[in-house]
Image (cartoon, rainbow, N blue to C red):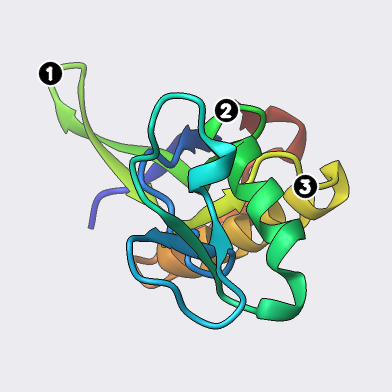
Amino acid sequence: MKTMRIDSIKIEKKIDENPDLSYLGEYSDTPKTGAIDLYPLQTQGPQYHYFNPANPEYAQQDFERMKAYSAGEWGCIGICAAARVSYDCGAGCRRIQIFRSGGLWGICDDNPREYIQTIEEEELLDLKQHLAAFGIDMSTFPADKIERL
């Protein structure tokens, strides 16, 4: 069996271009309980007539959050950990394979830094378990060499 070597480990953050924001509510032309009528609020004719909150108790708050998202004031990201692993295949060449954690998407990018770091650590643990399934030991890779993108 060829000896596998971890060449690099990166924590990747990518923009989630289509997040599920249904926990806030949805825009619609049909009102539901707690709906906010958008027609008087629009200056250029509304795309939808109502904002239907997921929780009517927080209708205004969730509507403001949704408006802020639409205005680009916050967004969502996905986080995963990736390891570049290689082995010698002769003649000075190495075969490279990328292993990734499962990843978590739909994370609000304005969450506290501590929360983001917790997710990063969870993804590193998932990557460690994934690599172990292939007999690759991540514990020998120096923690200070993990790139955080």
Image position, residue 130 (x, y; %): 42, 66
Foreground: 28 or 139? 28
Foreground: 90 or 28? 28
Find disc 2 in the rendering and name its residue: 71
Find disc 3 in the rendering and name its residue: 111
Find disc 1 in the rendering and name its residue: 91
Foreground: 89 or 106? 106
Question: Is 21 left, or right, of 18 in this rendering?
Answer: right
Q: What secondary structure is found at the residue carrying circle 1?
A: loop
Kindly identify the residue that appears in the image at 74 percent across and 40 percent down.
110
Q: What secondary structure is found at the residue carrying circle 3?
A: loop
Judged by depth in the image, the label closer to the viewer, 1 or 2, is 2
Kindly identify the residue that appears in the image at 59 percent across and 26 percent down.
149
Using the rendered view, name the quadrant where residue 144 is placed: top right
Identity, as a three-letter code, of the amino acid under mark 3: Asn
Q: Do labels 1 and 2 touch, CB within 8 Å?
A: no
Kindly identify the residue that appears in the image at 60 percent across and 55 percent down.
124
